[in-house]
Image (cartoon, grey):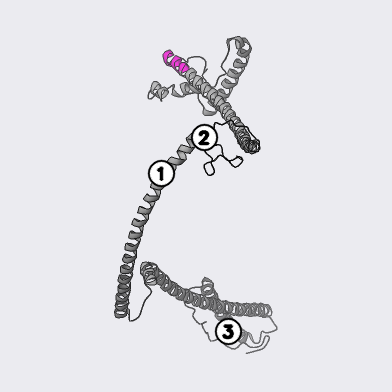
Amino acid sequence: DSFTEQLGENNKFADYLTKVFKKKIKRVKKAAEMDGDSDESDSDDDFDSSSEEEDDDEDGVEHLDLNICPPGCSQELYDATIVMREKKLDLEEAIQEEKKIIDSLRKEVDALVKKNKVISHGVKCAKNDLEAFQLEKQKKMNELDIVVTLNLDQIQYMQNGVLPSDLVSCLVFHSAGVNQLASRIKELQQEKAHQIRKFKELKKSHIHLIKGKKGMQEKLLGLDEKCQNMMLLKFGREVDLKKLENISTNRIAEELKETIAKKDVKYSRKLNEWDVQINQAKQRLLTATRDHTSHLDILNELTKDKQDLESVLDSKQKNLGGEYSGQRKADLKERQRLLQLVQLQAQEIDALKDEIGILSRKDGHILPPTQTAVPPLPPIGGRC
């Protein structure tokens, strides 16, 4: 954004400065590697410049060296673009370094998490082993015999006011524990009295709740009887209220189902009607095809008759010389009659062609073929 603001609007060197700003160069990271990397940077610059020259040639833009400020361009703007390019490259390098650090830290964290899991499992196992060892140790220590020196005033185990000779069944106990147990007896007595009072209060509340339960049951029976009477008055019989609630809540769904059923019936009827119409149209098409075929057969026969008549006329015209000179008038009449017959057959052929055209279009009303009076045709070679 700052680069575009720096360029301003309608800057004729905007494309050139943008290429300078976006130009990728190889930067020297260490001063000690300056001589070794200078050749590589020069080669990279040459590669970039060559690629940019190809882009310029492809775009039809005049080639300008990206390493030198072109004439007409502000040197300050060019230098500022170079500075911003350096800043951009610094930021990109910093981002790359941070990404590398993040990746390394992530890998280290994953390794530490795995190590922590292993250590936690080991610690848990060690604790279990230590606890088992402590139990075993305490068990073994309890089996050991230990000599304890006591004063006579510390011995409180008496039988008939006399110290017994066998002290095997005696228990060595701390005096503070004895005092705690004595005080605990009084606490237990107080707790017992408190629990007795609490039990009496709970018993009273239990009796009260039982009475309330009986009252509620009687009230519920009355409401059930009232509900049954109302159902008998409204429906004439007892009705399951749960089913009634489901029916009332699903009224919209039932209405939609009924509408869908009506639509299905309506559209199924329409589909049946269309099927009937399609079958009728197919039958009409079949009939028209048959008629068309029969008309084509008639047309073929008439064409053959026409060809035969034309051949007869040609043969008679050739033999009108001396062979039939005595009957010239009769032959002329026969020729005229044959010509009329040929014209009538030509008209009939044209009518059949028109009818065939109407049938091939599959529309319009089909008219019956025109019947023309055709005079009888004498046998070929006969006389009138």
The residue lying at 30 percent from left, 78 percent from top is: 229
| Left/right of residue 174 with respect to residue 258 in the rendered view | right
Secondary element type, mark 2? loop
- Between marks 2 and 3, how big is the CA–CA gap? 160 Å
Rendering coords of residue 346 (x, y %): 56, 77
The residue lying at 63 percent from left, 77 percent from top is: 300
Vertical order, 197 against 290 (above or below): above
Q: Of the numbered discs in the image, which one, if any, rests on residue 174?
A: 2
Rendering coords of residue 246 (x, y %): 39, 69
Secondary element type, mark 1? helix
Task: Give the main secondary structure of the magenta stretch.
Answer: helix
Viewer-side label of 2, 3: 2
Q: Earlier in the sequence, mark 3 or mark 1?
A: 1
Which region of the structure is painted magenta? 71-83
> Which quadrant of the figure has residue 52?
top right
The residue pinned by badge 1 equals 186
At label 3, which amino acid type do we have?
A: Arg
Vertical order, 128 against 378 (above or below): above
Mark 3 surroundings: few (<14), some (14-19) or many (≥20) residues within 10 A: some
